[in-house]
Image (tube, grey):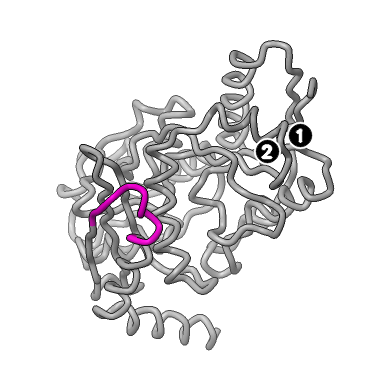
Amino acid sequence: MNKLMLGSRGSQLALWQTEWVKSELEKKFPKLSIEIQIIKTTGDKILDSPLSKIGDKGLFTREIEQAMLEKKIDAAVHSLKDLPTQLPEGLCIGAVSKREDVRDVFIANKEKCYKHFEDLPQNAIVATSSLRRKSQLLAWRPDLQIVDIRGNLNTRLAKLDESDWDGMLLARAGVVRLGFNERITEELPLEKMLPAVGQGALAIEIRQNDKQVTEIIESLNSQPTFISTSGERALLRSLEGGCQIPIGAYGRIEDNIFYLDALIGSLDGKKIVRGKIHGNPDDSEKLGEQLAKTLYDGGGREILESIRSLVNSH
């Protein structure tokens, strides 16, 4: 194989991620010619609605996956947290890159005098597009006003600067990758803000049974990250049923033991069901499924049912 075509969304962060994969592969396979094809996804076209209102998780992946099935591209680079837990038939995850810091960060409005989340005044306004963050924010500070924000990182930072909002929440990995470290005013503790499933890791999706591409892409795989995120994704797969729900999870391997913390939250943050599990890293998916059941039986079912009935009534 002498040429590899990578598919990517057109956003600045998506292109940074795909360029990073391209340069890592070029180091390992100097004779390989690698090109990037930009593909516009539904999620990139609809920017005026909250993600939770538009529907399922395939918003940022479906068109790219179609191009792969039609052999227009050989592999696709995604933020793992955007990748649905059920992949189309014929496709699989070929590699998961070594994970960045998984935490969410608080970015305070430059015009305000406070920098830390705890210092926000009563009824402060915080922007986020994520139901997971919203639920945990309201559990932490029920007085907050949450506004919905969409768009790429530059757009979001510009919106914050032009607004009277007090701050915004984003994933640290994306902010750092695009070089906006100086805008981070606080890294939020995992005890208060569990990340999204797969947050901080990149996934490279490929066709199953494509031996040549598999061998090339596998060279970028981080096995500890692959195992940890597989456990998180198994948990999510067991719970979601195609509905946007506030679920946070963080899996990692420490001293050869796999640990997984997770939560399901109500939309208003009044009810949060948390749990944790640990065991053999080889069983990460089974452990994820087990923890999903524990959360579901421990109050998660009521939360999920109320969110689903809300979604169905709209």
27 in relation to 154, above or below: above
Q: In the displayed structure, would residue 221 be above or below residue 243?
A: above
Contact flag, marks 2 and 1 (Cβ < 8 Å): yes
Give the image location of residue 209, x and y in percent.
71, 44
| Residue 8 marker | 2
Range shown magenta: 278-287
Q: Earlier in the sequence, mark 2 or mark 1?
A: 2
Depth check, front residue: 58 or 180: 58
Q: Is residue 127 visible?
A: no
**What amino acid is found at the position of numbered circle 2 in the picture?**
Ser
Distance (Cα) linking label 2 and label 1: 6 Å
**Percent coordinates x, y for residue 206 in the rendering:** 67, 42
Work out whether residue 226 or residue 122 is closer to the camera in this orientation and state it: 226
Q: Does the magenta segment cover residue 275?
A: no
Q: Quadrant of the C terminus?
A: bottom right
Q: Quick check: is 279 in the magenta stretch?
A: yes
| Residue at the disc numbered 1 | 37
